[in-house]
Amino acid sequence: MTELNLTDSATVLAAMTEIIEEIAGPRSVEITREATFDDALGVDSLTMVEIIVVAEERFEIKIPDSAFADMTTVGAAVDYITETVKRAKASA
Amino acid sequence: MNGAKILSVAAQRPAALMTNDQMIGDMDTDDAWIQARTGIRTRGVANDEETLLELSTGAASKAIAASGIDPTSIDLTIVATSSNPIVTPGIAPPLTEKLGVTSGAFDVMAACAGFCYSLNIAADAVRTGSARNVLLVGAERITDRMDPTDRNTAFLFGDGAGAAIISATDSDDDGIGPVVWGSDGALANYIHVPVGEKYLYMDGQGVFKWAITKVADIAREACDRAGIAPSELAAFVPHQANLRIIEAVARNLKLGENTVVADDVRYAGNTSAASVPMALTRLKEEGRVQPGDPTLLIGFGSGMTWASQVVRCP
């Protein structure tokens, strides 16, 4: 996904929305930064693993298990991804 | 060089099917949670009379009958199992005695990949002329290894046996594709019985994460070696570990919209080395696959180990 600016939160949110709907199917509520994976979006821990695996591939980053335990909201996931991409670019 | 084909496949299931409600006991869970996480509704639990040998004999007898071969033309018997209660002898030698044959006989311990590993061994044996016919059995009494208080494993596994007859055929009639097999011993602790202990331990999340990426890659390679695209498969028969894994892998593989995906796990639970032949047998019994259909088999599990091949459905 080198053509997308993955340091931009809005871009990453759109990409994550696509991934969530691809793995979990369309959601009955809007996927916003504030949406909790478990309560709002009905994404259980196994589906979360699948989403994270696809995100790692699409964004070309690694997300350790210790990090996604804190990703209770879509916003938390988006922020982690954008920060990781920024750090990777800075050290490149 | 001969060809190799699967002549028949059959299953032997325990008489008792335990529901999720019957398994729960004092654990903090319920039927809805178990079905959502695993897809499992019931699993077979063998009674004292349904020993590993009896389950194996039942499946083997049915497979032999369905194949139409003379049992004395079986030159090799392989039993894939990881639940033999004794160190020696294996299950295969007493199985041959029960069937009235004196073929070569040995057990394979490759956990949930055991059947697919052994299928390639059987295919090579008939192709080279080492055997005219091979009896291959995958059999487990995995529930003997379940900690009934461990929420991570207690509901997942079931008992049973599946068997197949692999036979030599003309080289242009070959029906067993090239195997893709391998291992990652660094992950040996993902699924294991600790030394000196009785019960199976499993890192469920680690296994899930590994499976949803690695298994699809292995399956794609098996298809590639067989010269068929995943979208052209008539059936996909993965090890019945967990319906969530099966569904995730199927999504990743981009199967055809008419490709049947085996789901015996709903009824039988995870039967380890028995799961692939049992699942294939169910598809045949339900008329969801036909003889000759290109069918992808994949076994994967403790080790971690894996083996996969495309076959023509018997």
Image (cartoon, rainbow, N blue to C red):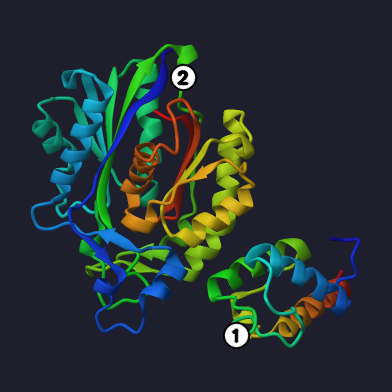
Dividing the image into 4 quarters, which one contains the C terminus of chain B?
top left
Label 2: how many Cα within 10 Å (few below 14, some 14–19, many 20+) = some
Q: A50 left or right of B239?
A: right
Q: Nearer the viewer, mark 2 or mark 1?
A: 1
Looking at the image, which is closer to me, B16 or B276?
B16
Residue at image x 43%, y 63%?
Answer: B39
Residue pictured at 57% horizontal, 58% vertical? B248
* Disc 1 residue type (three-letter): Asp
Residue appearing at x 57%, y 29% in the figure: B226
Residue B261 position, x and y percent, is 50, 46
Q: Quadrant of the N terminus of chain B?
A: top left
Q: Give, as a three-letter code, the residue at label 2.
A: Asp
Residue nearest the viewer, comparing B142 with B7 = B7
Q: Position of residue A66 (x, y in %)?
A: 60, 80
Q: Is residue A89 visible?
A: yes
Q: Please name whichever residue, B293 or B85, is drawn nearer the observer in this view of the structure.
A: B293
Q: Which residue is mark 2?
A: B174
Residue closest to the far bottom: A34
